[in-house]
Amino acid sequence: MFGVENVSIMSIKERVKQWLVSYHKALRDKRNKEGGFTLVELMVVVAIIAILAAVAMPQFLSAGDKARDAKIKADTQTIANAAQLYMVDKATDEVPSVDDLYKAGYLSELVKTPKGGEYAVTFENNAGGTGTHIVVTATDSTNNAN
């Protein structure tokens, strides 16, 4: 009627069905080939991550110690400077305590060590007896600032 050869509807359905079946089979085969990672590949990745973690972990663990030491050094230097100012302003040879420095306004806060301990301020003679210097010691550590 319209110049189309006489093809039955059933044969078209069968062709479409065959094409769909072969297409799905090809997709399934492709997926099976691409699968995923093998156990060996996953084990290699885990081993590499473990090695990197073993190398990096000590760096992270020592960061807290470095920060604590830096705070102690900064605190002791601040206290030593405040003590020198106090002694010059008051024209005294008596070494003030951290509490005295705070009460007199030479320290903006009552400074404590990172572990909550106290700082001790003392006076020492220089080597050879040529003067003196202030020593600030954190009572719960071994760090000093001169």
Image (cartoon, helix red, strand yellow):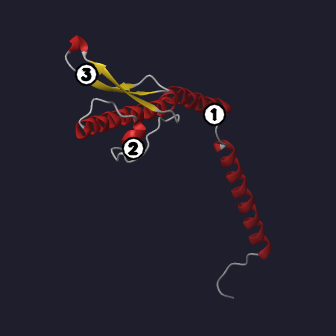
Dot 1 and dot 2 residues touching (CB under 8 Å): no
Given this view, does label 1 or label 2 mark the residue nearer the observer? 2
Residue corresponding to mark 1:
42
Report the residue marked by disc 2. 102
Residue flagged by tag 1: what amino acid is it? Leu
Residue extending farthest top: 128
On the image, numbered disc 3 is attached to which residue?
Answer: 132
Of the numbered discs 1 and 3, the one sitting upstream in the chain is: 1
Position of residue 108 relative to residue 6, above or below, is: above
> Which residue appears farthest toward the left when viewing the image?
130
To which quarter of the image does residue 102 belong?
top left
The x, y position of residue 13, in whole percent, is 77, 70
Q: Quick one: label 2, few (<14), some, or many (20+) residues within 10 Å?
A: some
Mark toward the start of the polypeptide (2 vs 3)? 2
Task: Give the amino acid at mark 3.
Answer: Thr
- C-alpha gap between disc 1 and disc 2: 60 Å
Point 69% across, 57% down: residue: 23
So how many labels did they put on this image?
Answer: 3
Q: Is residue 146 visible?
A: no
Q: Nearer the viewer, residue 42 or 131?
A: 131
The crowd level at tag 3 (other Cα within 10 Å; few <14, some 14-19, many 20+) is few
Could you say whether the residue bearing mark 1 is in a helix, strand or loop? helix
Which quadrant would residue 83 be assigned to in this image?
Answer: top left
Quarter of the rendering occupied by the N terminus? bottom right
Compared to residue 24, the image places residue 140 above or below, namely: above
Residue at point 69% right, 47% down?
A: 29
* Residue 115 in the figure: left or right of residue 107: right
Alpha carbon distance from label 1 to label 3: 66 Å
The percent position of residue 44, horizontal first and vertical second, equals 59, 29
- Amino acid found under the numbered disc labelled 2: Tyr
